[in-house]
Image (cartoon, grey):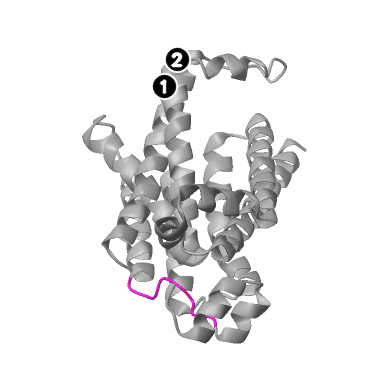
């Protein structure tokens, strides 16, 4: 039963992190190149534009949810399972979500990269 | 992609590693926090390593957001993974810890993955209609007037 709890929490971490990353990426594309924007309109403008973006706020909420799911997962399972499993699954799920929701051109080059990185993270963190 | 942007990506990697390491070091000094007394976390912030770690993680988040403002999520993600490699190298050459062959293989996989992505374009160029659909009026207007943002 404990194993089921751990894996449920891992799924929750992956889901919340992917939602957070996709929303954050979308929000920052809406804000626009912050370097260019800062040089043109100043830092305060960039901060106000970012903080008032609803997608940015939802992204922060999702990332907080991912963090608390991580705390729960760690209280049920070993860090040597939870950390690499959550991190490497997030890499793959992010690539899928970026293709579907952000319409990013995830070509073969990026699929290979996401898989290599996911495998590498699993080996390193394990 | 110019030098400044690669510097931001390097910041994403380095700040994440520095922040995590300081946080981990500080939390070990603080000791275990019971799940029944979570308010103990508040006292942890008083530890200088924890405080410094949080500052570095804020810097990480700022650089991560900056990178996402001009690069695809699938382009920036591998850069964050380079942090694991950096961490392992610090463990090996600074802390003189043993790295198993399996971990070296992990380092090789992540590094080659990052190399794969870095060789391609950083940003998917959405045609004019797509930019408007995404609700990005500035970008759509800029595309229409032929100005590069």
On whether residue A20 falls in the magenta region, the answer is no
Disc 1: host chain: B
CA distance separating discs 2 and 1: 9 Å
Are discs 2 and 1 both within one chain?
Answer: yes
**Is residue B119 shown to the viewer in this render?**
yes
Q: Nearer the viewer, residue B144 or A89?
A: B144
Q: Nearer the viewer, mark 2 or mark 1?
A: 1
Question: What is the x, y in percent for residue B48?
Answer: 42, 18
Q: Secondary structure at mark 1?
A: helix
Q: Which mark is residue B81?
A: none
Residue B26, quarter of the rendered image: top left
Label 2: which secondary element: helix
Q: Split into 4 quadrants, where in the image is the C terminus of chain B?
A: bottom left
Where is residue A49 drawn, in percent x and y?
59, 54
Residue at 58% x, 53% y: name it: A50
Identify the residue at horizontal 36%, vertical 62% (top origin).
Answer: B114
Does residue A86 appear to the left or right of A42 in the view shown?
A: right
Q: How many other residues sit within 10 Å of disc 2, few (<14), some (14-19) or many (≥20)?
A: few
Q: Which mark is residue B49?
A: 1
Where residue A38 appears, as percent x and y from the top left, is: 44, 55
Position of the N terminus of chain B, as image quadrant, is bottom left
Question: Relative to residue A72, is residue A119 depicted above or below?
Answer: below
Q: Which residue is mark 2?
A: B29
Q: Would you say the magenta stretch is mainly helix, strand or loop? A: loop
Chain under callout 2? B
Please report the bounds of the magenta region as a residue range: B119-126
Q: Position of residue A89 (x, y in %)?
A: 58, 56
């Amino acid at each position: 039963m404990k194993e089921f709890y751990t894996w449920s929490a891992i799924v929750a971490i992956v889901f919340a992190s992917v939602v957070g990353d996709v929303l954050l990426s979308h929000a920052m594309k809406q804000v626009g190149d912050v370097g260019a924007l800062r040089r043109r309109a100043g830092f305060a403008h960039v901060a106000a534009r970012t903080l008032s973006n609803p997608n940015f706020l939802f992204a922060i909420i999702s990332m907080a949810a991912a963090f608390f799911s991580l705390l729960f997962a760690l209280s049920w399972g070993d860090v040597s399972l939870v950390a690499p499993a959550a991190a490497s699954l997030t890499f793959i799920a992010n690539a899928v979500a970026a293709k579907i929701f952000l319409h990013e051109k995830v070509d073969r080059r990026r699929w290979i990269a996401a898989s290599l990185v996911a495998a590498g993270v699993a080996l390193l963190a394990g | 992609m110019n030098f400044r942007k690669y510097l931001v990506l390097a910041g994403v990697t380095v700040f994440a590693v520095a922040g995590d390491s300081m946080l981990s070091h500080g939390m070990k000094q603080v000791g275990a926090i019971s799940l029944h007394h979570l308010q103990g976390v508040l006292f942890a912030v008083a530890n200088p390593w924890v405080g410094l770690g949080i500052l570095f993680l804020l810097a990480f988040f700022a650089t991560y957001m900056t990178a996402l403002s001009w690069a695809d999520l699938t382009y920036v993600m591998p850069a964050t993974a380079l942090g694991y490699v950096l961490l392992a190298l610090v463990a090996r050459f600074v802390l003189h810890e043993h790295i198993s062959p399996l971990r070296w293989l992990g380092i090789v996989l992540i590094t080659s993955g990052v190399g794969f992505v870095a060789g391609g374009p950083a940003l998917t160029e959405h045609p004019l209609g797509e930019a408007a659909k995404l609700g990005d009026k500035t970008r759509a207007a800029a595309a229409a007037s032929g100005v590069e943002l």
